[in-house]
Image (tube, grey):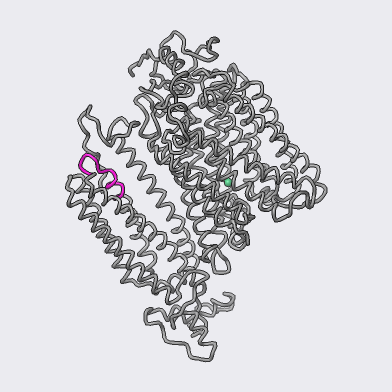
């Protein structure tokens, strides 16, 4: 292979430094319309981030209301009906508006083309359209709250969802349908971009692992989401016109609904967790100053998880009357997914082993992810085991398990990613000390909230109940206190990140010493990312990066970069 | 259908339709084609859920499907199948005409495709209207008005009348709906082996016929929505063709609408035998 020796590093970084003060994507155009109708992937990513965080605030308020209600047995602050509404809205908003689009649509949109060395996604207008669909979906969710709300639980199980008198069911289902298409178009855009817009030299095995993760995620988005689309469509028709397909009174089969729903919603778990794992793969390597261990294993385990994930949905239905044979098969297949997941965890640990680890905020959150995801993944095995599942089914054990995976996994990785790319997105550095403090509050608060729920669940406390026997009171109160502590952590994050926008130190092009291409352009990046894409090399080769105290960031050293090496 | 690339303009000459983030018209065209195929895959998966529901109910209750499908008009279904096949041909010709820069032929072929689509929806309307009048609808609205339909037959018998004649529109249906074997209503153990003497029963043995019509309306309704969307796209393409936007150098929208139309046709090719031609 021809060694492409580049003169790029020094001159380019110098240009990037100069560019930081000049024209960038934030200053390129002005006015609210230049944001709402932009086709720049970076601006769309920022809009997604702001909108998703707003939805997170809304879903978080419902979570706090639910936890506060559970402080004491019996009525505490709201009626039982309102309690049902609150946990339903909390779940639906967090799943469909926050966690599923969170990492791909916000962070993925921003960094994917830059990491690739492209000027934009393949279909910029489709990208804007999928953002507008997201907004429409969010408005429908708000409409659902206004028109009488929903109390079905986020899973909308029939026949309850077709018979409950709450007026918000149809709007919220329409919202889920619209959000599904928003997700599909994002995935479609990512797949085409990664296939067709890689510049010469950016081979598949020079792709940063975050892009492998986004690619695998996009495959699931394309293959699973249409099934959710048709399912909620049928549910709407069922509710409005009495179609009968899911309605036992009309000869239909409600378990069929569960099959359809989980055929999407189990793979959706991997839509949530795969991009999170991608972020972790980036951060672990950069903050250990060490080449990622087992690049190919991590890349292919993303694809393996995406594919295996399609064959395990029945594990949500072990007590729904499936045949024993089917149940056993689903249980076995569920265990198989833990293999590629464990492959990733061991590779991250091996990457850190012997590295020089710097415990900056993104790395702290990443370590939190590995710890929490470890617990979330292992308790998933308890639930995948048939006998244990019957005991733990629909208890707080399940609630704790999926919060360890979805919140402790996806959301904390998203927070890590926000801290990691914040200097790139905004051109500002946040307070490292407050960042570490927020980590402490979130990490302790999270475990205090959800670990007691494992104990409650294994003692038989059912999920979604308004009332409970006094013996659970102490654990419920621990959990609620934990949720308040976590809230303090999130508010702290919001405060210091917003503060950094106005008073933060200007960020250098490469504050952390990353070797992926987004660190090669200025912070914030220029409107078209690159005039010429920088030559793609090994995305985890940090040997030539040196810390320059004058600019507070990393620059390439004297040795020219050879662009012919692939990750080993 | 054609996915051949547009003629590459000579190097250096600016291509008017090339967006800034692509390096060549060929790269742009390939990206659009890949994106379109992925979108069509999601469309097929959208129908996939319904096909799945069809398969589950047909496997669990074959008698419903055997009994109810005769109420669909095979001839109208066949005519509609023929219409869509012809429209696929005219659509392919339209794409070819665009590639050859034959503007007039392109407009004619697009107009013919639109006419076929409208004809299809017209016939679909006639079928739906017929079902509506007979009350052969889904779940909650299933109120068969036809004298031969199971609900009214049962009703009439209760009032001391003789069961009405077999439905004229459903030849051969009598055996299915009016006979049963004793074992079907009681525990299997009560039926002597080999004793399958059919008894005439006042009770039609096929229950939950509305399931078939639920599946029928869900599948054909979703398909009709897609035909409607295709017609809107075709209208837009025809309008742009009339403005002279397409030529051998740029025909991407025609090719993409063509792909979409073929997939919509293809789905009908599966729907027709699955719903109308059950044995
Ligand atoms: Cu699952």
Relative to A157, A424 lies left or right:
left
**Does any portion of residue B84 appear in the rendered image?**
yes
Q: Is residue B134 above or below residue B3?
A: below
A389 or A240, which is in the foreground? Answer: A240
Q: Is residue A295 above or below residue A12?
A: below
Percent across and percent down for residue A432 are 63, 21
**Does any portion of residue B279 appear in the rendered image?**
no
Percent across and percent down for residue A521 are 44, 21
A238 or A273, which is in the foreground? Answer: A238
Residue range highlighted in magenta? B246-258
Q: Is residue A71 above or below residue A114?
A: below
Percent across and percent down for residue A35 are 46, 35
Q: Residue at x 38, y 38 (%)?
A: A123
Residue B106 lies in magenta, yes or no?
A: no
Residue B251 lies in magenta, yes or no?
A: yes
Q: Residue at x 56, y 65 (%)?
A: A247
Relative to A3, A463 lies left or right:
right
Give the position of the C terminus of chain B as an image quadrant: bottom left
């Amino acid at each position: 292979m021809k060694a492409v020796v580049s003169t790029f590093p020094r001159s380019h970084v110098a240009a990037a430094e100069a560019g930081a003060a000049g024209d960038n994507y934030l200053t390129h155009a002005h006015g609210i319309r230049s944001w709402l109708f932009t086709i720049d992937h970076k601006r769309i990513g920022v809009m997604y981030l702001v909108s998703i965080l707003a939805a997170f605030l809304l879903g978080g308020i419902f979570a706090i209301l639910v936890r506060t209600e559970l402080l004491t047995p019996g009525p505490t602050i709201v009626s039982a009906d309102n309690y049902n509404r609150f946990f339903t809205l909390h779940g639906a908003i967090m799943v469909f508006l926050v966690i599923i689009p969170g990492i791909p649509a916000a962070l993925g949109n921003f960094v994917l083309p830059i990491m690739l060395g492209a000027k934009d996604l393949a279909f910029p207008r489709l990208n804007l359209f999928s953002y507008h669909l997201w907004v429409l979906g969010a408005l429908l969710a708000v409409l659902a709250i206004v028109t009488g709300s929903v109390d079905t639980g986020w899973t909308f199980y029939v026949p309850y969802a077709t018979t409950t008198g709450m007026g918000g069911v149809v709007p919220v289902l329409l919202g889920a349908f619209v959000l599904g298409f928003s997700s599909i178009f994002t995935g479609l855009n990512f797949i085409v971009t990664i296939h067709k817009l890689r510049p010469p030299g950016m081979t598949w095995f020079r792709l940063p692992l975050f892009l492998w993760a986004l690619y695998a995620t996009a495959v699931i988005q394309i293959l699973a989401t249409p099934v959710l689309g048709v399912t909620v469509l049928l549910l709407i028709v069922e509710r409005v016109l009495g179609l009968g397909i899911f309605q036992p009174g009309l000869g239909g089969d409600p378990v069929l609904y569960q099959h359809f729903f989980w055929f999407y919603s189990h793979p959706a778990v991997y839509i949530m967790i795969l991009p999170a794992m991608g972020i972790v793969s980036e951060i672990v390597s950069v903050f250990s100053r060490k080449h990622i261990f087992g690049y190919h294993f991590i890349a292919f385990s993303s694809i393996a998880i995406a594919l295996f994930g399609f064959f395990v949905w029945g594990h949500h239905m072990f007590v729904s009357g499936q045949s024993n044979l089917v149940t056993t098969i689903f249980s076995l297949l569920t265990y198989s997914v833990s293999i590629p997941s464990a492959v990733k965890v061991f590779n991250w640990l091996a990457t850190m082993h012997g590295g020089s680890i710097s415990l900056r905020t993104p790395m702290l959150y990443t370590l939190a992810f590995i710890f929490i995801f470890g617990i979330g993944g292992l308790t998933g095995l308890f639930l995948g085991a048939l006998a244990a599942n019957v005991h733990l089914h629909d208890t707080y054990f399940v609630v704790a398990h999926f919060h360890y995976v979805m919140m402790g996994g996806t959301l904390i990785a998203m927070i890590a990613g926000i801290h990691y790319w914040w200097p790139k997105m905004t051109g500002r550095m946040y307070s490292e000390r407050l960042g570490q403090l927020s980590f402490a509050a979130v990490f302790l608060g999270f475990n205090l909230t959800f670990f007691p729920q494992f104990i409650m669940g294994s003692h038989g406390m059912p999920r979604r109940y308004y009332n409970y026997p006094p013996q659970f009171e102490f654990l419920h109160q621990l959990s609620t206190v934990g949720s308040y502590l976590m809230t303090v952590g999130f508010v702290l994050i919001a405060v210091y990140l917003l503060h950094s926008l106005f008073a933060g130190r200007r960020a250098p092009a490469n504050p952390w010493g990353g070797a992926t291409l987004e660190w090669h352009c200025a912070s914030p990046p220029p409107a078209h990312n690159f005039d010429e894409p920088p030559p793609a090399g090994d995305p985890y080769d940090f040997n030539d990066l040196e810390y320059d105290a004058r600019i507070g960031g990393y620059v390439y050293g004297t040795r020219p970069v050879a662009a012919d090496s692939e990750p080993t | 259908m054609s996915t051949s690339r547009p003629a590459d303009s000579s190097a250096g000459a600016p291509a008017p339709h090339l967006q800034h983030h692509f390096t060549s018209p060929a790269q742009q065209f390939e990206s659009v084609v890949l994106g379109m195929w992925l979108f069509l895959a999601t469309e097929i998966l959208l129908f996939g859920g319904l096909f799945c529901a069809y398969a589950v109910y047909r496997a669990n209750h074959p008698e419903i499907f055997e009994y109810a499908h005769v109420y669909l008009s095979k001839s109208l279904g066949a005519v509609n199948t023929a219409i869509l096949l012809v429209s696929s041909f005219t659509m392919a010709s339209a794409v070819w005409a665009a590639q050859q820069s034959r503007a007039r032929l392109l407009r004619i072929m697009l107009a013919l495709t639109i006419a076929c689509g409208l004809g299809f929806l017209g016939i679909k309307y006639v079928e739906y209207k017929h079902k509506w009048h007979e009350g052969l609808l889904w779940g909650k609205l299933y109120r068969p008005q036809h004298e031969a339909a199971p609900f009214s037959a049962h009703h009439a018998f209760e009032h001391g009348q003789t069961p009405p004649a077999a439905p004229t529109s459903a030849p051969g249906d009598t055996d299915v709906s009016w006979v049963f074997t004793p074992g079907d209503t009681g525990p299997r153990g009560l039926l002597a082996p080999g004793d399958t003497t059919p008894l005439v029963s006042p009770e039609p043995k096929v229950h939950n016929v509305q399931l078939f019509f639920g599946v029928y309306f869900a599948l054909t309704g979703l398909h009709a929505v897609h035909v409607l969307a295709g017609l809107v796209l075709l209208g837009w393409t025809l309008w742009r063709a009339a403005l002279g936007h397409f030529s051998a150098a740029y025909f991407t929208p025609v090719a993409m609408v063509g792909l979409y139309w073929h997939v919509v046709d293809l789905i009908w090719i599966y729907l027709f035998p699955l719903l109308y031609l059950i044995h």
